[in-house]
Amino acid sequence: MRKIFIGLMILAGISSFAQEAGKAGELLRNEASTSEMQSQNSSGFRNKTFERNSGNQNNRIKNPSYQWNRNYGYAEVFLRVPEQGFFTVEVGDQMIANGSGKFRFFDLQSGRVPVSIYENGFLIYRSSLMLRNNSRMVLDFFTNEGLYLLDSYPVQGQYGFNDWNDIWNNPYGNNPGNWGSQGNVMDNNTFRRFFDMMKKNESFDDGKIALINQQMKNSMFTATQIRDLVKSLSFDKNKLSLAKSMYRNCLDKDRYFVVYDAFDFESSKRELMNYISRL
């Protein structure tokens, strides 16, 4: 009886961490017809694969106006299939096939692009994505539920293992592991709670700086958030020291000029400018 109880507890624990289809994201309608999904050949999957791998180079269709370095816009798509099986995902003119369930597409043109999902060569889902320039679209696909758009993020040009965990765990309310501060940016609501708590509990600059330094070990900040934190201090000497130390934790360093508004004296602004220019 005890073993049965322990087994039930383990199953309950596992299910509590499962990704529940439909819990997060916007469902994208399946545009594939029934006839397309019933035949492997009619899906076009085998034909496209054959055409791309064909050894007859003389029959290749060439575009005389093609320019490899032309700016067609830049977008990314991260799509996950959290199920066992071998899937192929096609986004625009790119195709990835694997059994891991993680599909990352880079260098996609912005605008409306088709997305098709195949299982063992059979088309099972087709929809359209509206990709914004310099953005990353994140999706989940469940064979019995459909394709869900979780969110769209601005591309910062920085990638790492933590991207997978943050993107797919946060919409479901799970807690990803701490893989470092890179990419863990405070959203506005979290920052506001942190800021209000700091002002309530810390009256002096030393206490505020200690609390901010502790948070910097796990979080990145936007330039606007850093400006508000620096502005909350009383003395320009402390403001300058904090502004210098927080620069490395700024997500949008190209907007760090907004931090200058937090200073009372022009000399402090100049010193911060000189400090950044020497980095």
Image (spheres, rainbow, N blue to C red):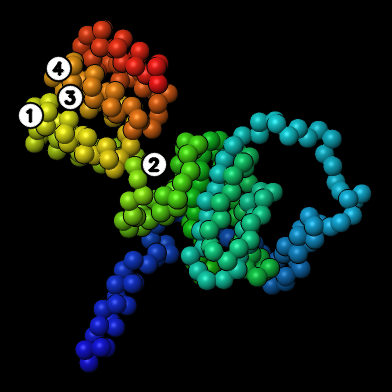
Residue 163 in view in this figure: yes
* Mark 4 or 3: the one toward you: 4
> For the point 72% across and 70% down, which residue is it?
40
Q: CA distance from mark 3 to mark 1?
A: 10 Å
SS for tag 1? loop
Q: Name the residue tied to disc 1.
A: 203
Nearer the N terminus, badge 1 or badge 2? 2
Q: CA distance from mark 4 to mark 1?
A: 13 Å
Quadrant (top left, top right, bottom left, bottom right) of the N terminus? bottom left
Q: Name the residue tied to disc 4.
A: 235
SS for tag 4? loop
Q: CA distance from mark 1 to mark 2?
A: 30 Å
SS for tag 2? loop
Give the x, y percent position of residue 219.
30, 40
Q: Amino acid at mark 2?
A: Gly
Tag 4 and tag 3, C-beta contact below 8 Å: no
Nearer the N terminus, badge 3 or badge 1? 1
